[in-house]
Image: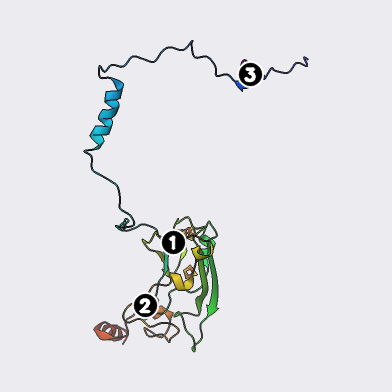
């Protein structure tokens, strides 16, 4: 068996640098078919571009409109009376592949009720430095509490402000909604909320008639 090692020394060196291999043996590039000189062809491309539709967007002076199903910043939704849909189950946090969600559940009491059921999301945070906007969390949410909006303006200049808290993620109060905590206004238990059993108006009378 030979002790000789393969020679890994570059074949040629010039002032300490490895010389490029010679291309003299390669075939020359094929001749161009066109009789128009290459510089004129190049300027032709530039000239033709001047008549094309301009696609420059004047953002942020003109807000960008996303597709309707664009996955942007998350929203924690409310029931029509203002109670929170989140029940603090943490399924969204478990589904998240980026470990971007932190949830702590709390117990509702008759004195302080935040959601129709037994539990509510007492602490809720989403770390947008980790989130990859995959949407798995909203698929996992059993109450449709968590959804994603079209808002994509999430840039900031420090890490702390990119950890969104429950207060930042909660949907705004619409007319007819009341800031929790408050008693259940739309039924006696959470089933009434999720089954959308009306308690007022002609629709409620029809339901009462069906039950009688
Ligand atoms: S969108 Fe994806 S990465 Fe972002 S919080 Fe939800 S599950 Fe996690
Ligand atoms: S947002 Fe949905 S999945 Fe997440 S803790 Fe609340 S109810 Fe559970």
Q: Position of residue 117 (x, y in %)?
A: 47, 79
Q: Is residue 49 magenta?
A: no
Q: Secondary structure at mark 2?
A: loop
Query: Distance between the Cα atoms at labels 2 and 3?
Result: 73 Å
Neighbourhood count class around disc 1 (C-alpha, 10 Å): few under 14, some 14–19, many 20 upward: some
Quarter placement of the N terminus? top right
Counting residues from the start of the chain, the first of labels 2 and 1 encountered is 1
Residue beneath disc 3: 10
Judge from the rendering whether residue 129 lies leftward or rightward of residue 51; answer left or right: right
The magenta span reads 11-15
Neighbourhood count class around disc 3 (C-alpha, 10 Å): few under 14, some 14–19, many 20 upward: few
Residue that appears at 47% across and 63% down: 140
Judge from the rendering whether residue 70 lies leftward or rightward of residue 131; answer left or right: left
Q: Position of residue 125 (x, y in %)?
A: 51, 68
Residue beneath disc 2: 173
The mark tally for this picture is 3
Q: Nearer the viewer, mark 2 or mark 1?
A: 2
Residue beneath disc 1: 139
Counting residues from the start of the chain, the first of labels 3 and 1 encountered is 3
Our reading of the magenta stretch's main secondary structure is: loop
């Amino acid at each position: 068996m030979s002790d000789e090692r393969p020679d890994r020394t570059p074949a040629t060196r010039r002032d300490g640098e490895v010389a490029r291999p010679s291309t003299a043996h390669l075939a020359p590039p094929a001749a161009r078919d066109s009789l128009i000189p290459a510089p004129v062809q190049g300027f032709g491309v530039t000239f033709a571009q001047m008549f094309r539709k301009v696609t420059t967007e004047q953002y942020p002076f003109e807000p960008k409109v996303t597709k309707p199903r664009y996955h942007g910043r998350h929203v924690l939704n409310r029931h029509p009376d203002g109670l929170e849909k989140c029940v603090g189950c943490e399924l969204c946090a478990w589904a998240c592949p980026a470990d971007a969600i932190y949830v702590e559940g709390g117990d509702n009491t008759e004195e302080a009720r935040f959601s129709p059921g037994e539990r509510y999301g007492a602490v809720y945070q989403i770390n947008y430095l980790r989130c990859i906007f995959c949407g798995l969390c909203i698929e996992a949410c059993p109450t449709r509490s968590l959804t994603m909006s079209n808002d994509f303006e999430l840039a900031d200049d420090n890490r702390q402000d990119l950890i969104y808290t429950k207060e930042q993620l909660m949907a705004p109060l619409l007319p007819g909604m009341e800031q929790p905590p408050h008693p259940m206004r739309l039924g006696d238990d959470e089933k009434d909320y999720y089954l959308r059993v009306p308690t007022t108006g002609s629709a409620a009378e029809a339901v009462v008639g069906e039950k009688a």
